[in-house]
Amino acid sequence: MNEAESSFPVILSLPDFIPARMLNEFAYCPRLCYLEWAQQEWDDNEWTMDGNFQHRRVDRPSGDLPDADEMEEQAPEAVHARSVMLSAEGCGFIAKMDLIEAEAGAVLPVEYKRGSVPDNPERSWEPERVQLCAQAMILRENGYVCPTGVLYYAQSRQRVEIAITDALAARTLEIARELRCVMQSGETPRPLQDSPKCPGCSLAGICLPDEILHEAAHPNAEAEEDAIRRLYPARDDAAPLYVQDQGAYVGKSNEELVVKLKGTKVADIRFIDLSHVCLYGNVQISTQAIQELLKRSIPLLYFSFGGWFNGICGGMPHKNVELRRRQYRAEYGKESLEIARVLVQNKIQNSRILLRRNSAEGNEDAIEDLRRAEQQAGEAANMESLLGFEGNAARIYFQHFSSMLKPKESDGGLSGFDFTTRNRRPPRDPVNAMLSFAYSLLTKEFAIVLLRVGFDPFMGFYHQPRYGRPALALDMMEPFRPLIADSVVISVINNGVIQSKDFVRSAGAFALKPDARKAFIMTYERRMDSLITHPIFNYRISYRRVLEVQARLLARYLLGELPTPPEFCTR
């Protein structure tokens, strides 16, 4: 173990009590339990939301459960106590019980389930019986008489009585022992193989069971068609909101975000339809709106008037401490160079393919030079060499970038979009102004995704940490610069969406006019929402979803589940 590893132990300490719900999850799928409890992952789907709805009454505390001594001395009248939290040191369990019914000196825990009674001999599933048994064991250890429990299935409105037998208690304790061993190992359990449980799991898009198993067995090899199930939506239902009118005011009205300009409402968007909110320059937002965005985990991003990404406002950071420890440790290990090599190689390859597809001229020499640089990047012995190969490839690529531009003759042809090399801070021509703006948009996309996955976006592997720079976001966007940002710039020029008159020039710097920026953002969003075929998993997915998948695969690599960093090279 090197110095860095000893400074960042990855195994987390186990709490004193195991929640009864985690026993249910572990019996259902050990990986699901680990993701939820150790890595604090969560996501809702229609079933979990329906489950919350079915629990709406029993989740509200009400009724008093008599002490066990009082029940022994005098049997109370029938009582119903809802949402009761109890723990027991002997068995090491803790549970918030939906409902406890007490009558004639005995108590009966009632666990609510959203579905119908299973069609099997036990009329219940083992994970549910284990959870109920843990609740009964807690009650017994607290002095109550608890011979049975009840599973209540909300959809069929039926109660199934479960006897708390010695065999069920032994099985519950056995699962608890296995759970503790897995948690103390610090290793994420493998996904279930082609399991019918996965499509209904709300964490399928986080777990990525088929993708992980494929990558672990065949790193970065293309999967056969239909071999990998896409267990999450191909694109997001929610969309970002951009507010760039100077002097605009963003407020909250019931379940909507309202945008006003000079006192007149210009837009209203439901919160459930928002993925994130971007404010440019002097746009005001109310405290009530900010608090609602924080409560709903909708990121709020601030940009300068010119489009510089200033920062992000979000709720509490992701609780996956284990991943951040692995990320910090990798900075000092061999993983850092390995990840950087893959990112740079992918970027050069995607640049080469974009140039080959879109160049009006025969750039065979440049394409061959890029192929050579790609190979050199894959063999770089250290970060300094890699920087050199990447810089050389960028020089070749941007030397020929203008060959992909075909502006309309009515707009003056190439004279309005003269481009010779990349420049920035400030951009000194229209093409560089659009490239910088597109890279800024892509940076914020990855900053949001990395925070959602649990990374620290400021600790990169290729881009070194610098005050205020989201280094990991810049790392992750490298392969996607040509595929998303550069493609959008080429598209708006070649399709006449942006013309040479759509820029303001000040002190030698160029920037898009407000209406042109709006048109540019719309083209960018269409690109992010467009469906592509994933080059490895062979299913259709939007670019915005791809960014999250790549970030989650990188997390699985750092957590030791995958042998190599994830790649993304267009075909």
Image (tube, rainbow, N blue to C red):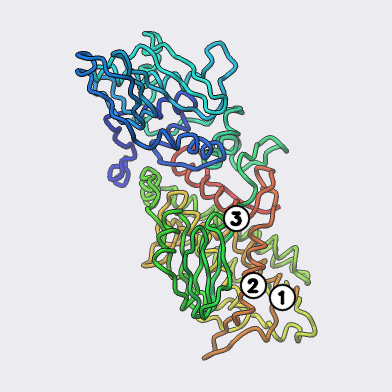
Asked whether, in this view, residue 326 is left or right of residue 372, the answer is left
Q: Residues within 10 Å of mark 2 (few under 14, many from 20)?
A: many
Q: Residues within 10 Å of mark 3 (few under 14, many from 20)?
A: many
Marker count (numbered): 3
Residue at which label 2 appears: 520
Residue at which label 3 appears: 544
Residue at which label 1 appears: 497
- Say what secondary structure mark 2 lies in: helix
Q: Residues within 10 Å of mark 1 (few under 14, many from 20)?
A: some
Which quadrant would the N terminus be assigned to in this image?
top left
> Real-space Cα distance between discs 1 and 3?
22 Å
Q: Residue furthest bottom?
A: 507
Q: Residue furthest right?
A: 409
Asked whether the beta carbons under mark 3 and mark 2 sit within 8 Å of each other, the answer is no
- Tell me where residue 69 appears, x and y as whole percent: 19, 18
- Say what secondary structure mark 3 lies in: helix
Three-letter amino acid code of the residue under disc 1: Val
- Asked whether 550 or 566 is in front, the reply is 550
Question: Which of disc 2 and disc 3 is earlier in sequence?
Answer: 2
Find residue 167 and name its label.
Answer: none
- Say what secondary structure mark 1 lies in: loop
Asked whether the beta carbons under mark 1 and mark 2 sit within 8 Å of each other, the answer is yes
- Asked whether 377 or 451 is in front, the reply is 451
Asked whether, in this view, residue 355 is left or right of residue 312, the answer is right
